[in-house]
Image: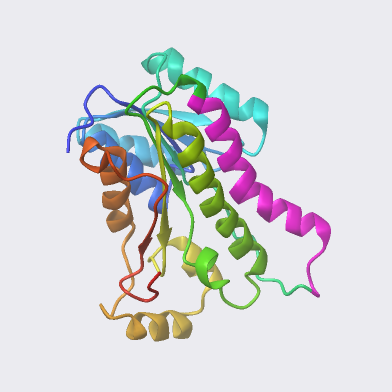
């Protein structure tokens, strides 16, 4: 795969899956705008890793749940790398906290939906204005969007299910311009997400029940994203691709 002369934006690109995606795209030749919100030091680490492999990247701080920040991220990217945007990877999102419906209120529901869905909507809306034939948008959904998630994950699962639906809708709407829109749906991937929200016993049980007998790795998700960003996947459109080691078939 060759992404030379391509311009990419990776929201939530400072750590875990976002970091590995940023590094992978840069390794394939793309110029990458690594977005972060609060953790600038992690974004700096991502940039250092990219520079060590000879890649080109910038750091852009933005809260992509806000229209003005999303637009500013795109403007900074264009000022650094040029007008067209070839690749958008919407990684930014969050789980926040496990809560049952009895425990959550409207503010909590709206916050989680905004983190995962509004961010994807805003970045797609504003970035797609500068995308031409051959450009690619990849959204990070989740296995939770298919199976409803684990205990206390109803809002997160709902938001990721909405991301999958939005992906299919945008595939139809933007396909006429030659812009491809797809999503990846990770299962149990070894990241700080599960370090924070999933206890060790549950992780071990899930890994053991997976046909491949292990958790996934963030680099494996990055490999899939890079493929979807490349010309090699040029006839894949509106797909929500599972990457879970066979834990769930859809």
Q: Left or right of 228: which side holds 74?
A: right
Up-down relation of residue 174 to residue 250 (above or below):
above
Residue 178 as seen in the image, left or right of residue 94: left
Horizontal and vertical percent for residue 214? 30, 76
Q: At 53% across and 34% down in the image, what residue appears?
A: 124
Q: Is residue 106 magenta?
A: yes
* Residue 192 seen in this snapshot: yes
- Going by the picture, which residue comes out furthest to the left? 1
In percent of the image, x 40 and y 24: which residue is there?
A: 85
- Determine whether 98 is above or below 133 in the image: below
* 164 drawn magenta: no
Magenta residue span: 102-128
Q: Which of 125 and 222 is in front in this view?
A: 125
Left or right of 5 on screen, residue 196: right
Location of residue 171 with respect to 243 vertically, above or below: above
Task: Report the label total.
Answer: 0
Residue 220, by quadrant, is bottom left
User: What colour scheme was applied to this rendering of the protein?
Assistant: rainbow
Quadrant showing the C terminus: bottom left
The image shows residue 201 at horizontal and vertical percentages of: 46, 86
Residue under the point 39% across and 83% down: 204
Residue 62 visible somewhere in the drawing? no
Q: In this view, does 53 lie to the left or right of 89?
A: left
Prevailing secondary structure class for the magenta stretch in the rendered image: helix
Place residue 83 in its image quadrant.
Answer: top left
Q: Where is residue 116 in the image (x, y as percent from the top left)?
A: 59, 50
The quarter in which the N terminus is drawn is: top left
């Amino acid at each position: 795969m060759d992404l030379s002369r391509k311009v990419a934006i990776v929201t939530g690109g400072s750590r875990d899956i976002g970091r590995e995606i940023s590094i992978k795209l840069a390794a394939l030749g793309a110029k990458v705008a690594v977005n972060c919100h609060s953790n600038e030091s992690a974004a700096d680490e991502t940039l250092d890793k990219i520079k060590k492999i000879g890649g080109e990247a910038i750091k852009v701080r933005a809260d992509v749940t806000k229209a003005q920040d999303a637009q500013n991220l795109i403007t900074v990217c264009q000022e650094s790398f040029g007008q067209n945007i070839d690749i958008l990877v919407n990684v930014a999102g969050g789980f926040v906290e496990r809560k049952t419906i009895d425990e959550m209120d409207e503010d909590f529901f709206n916050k989680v939906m905004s983190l995962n869905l509004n961010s994807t909507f805003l970045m797609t809306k504003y970035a797609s204005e500068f995308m031409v034939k051959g450009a690619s948008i990849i959204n990070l959904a989740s296995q939770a969007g298919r199976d409803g998630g684990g205990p206390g994950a109803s809002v997160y699962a709902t938001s990721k299910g909405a991301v999958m639906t939005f992906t299919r809708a945008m595939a139809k709407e933007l396909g006429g311009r030659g812009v491809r829109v797809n999503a990846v749906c990770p299962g149990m991937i070894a990241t700080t997400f599960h370090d924070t929200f999933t206890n060790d016993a549950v992780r071990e049980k899930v890994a053991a029940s997976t046909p491949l007998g292990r958790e996934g790795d963030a680099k494996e998700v990055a490999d899939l994203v890079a493929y979807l960003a490349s010309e090699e996947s040029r006839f894949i459109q509106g797909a929500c691709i599972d990457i879970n080691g066979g834990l769930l078939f859809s």
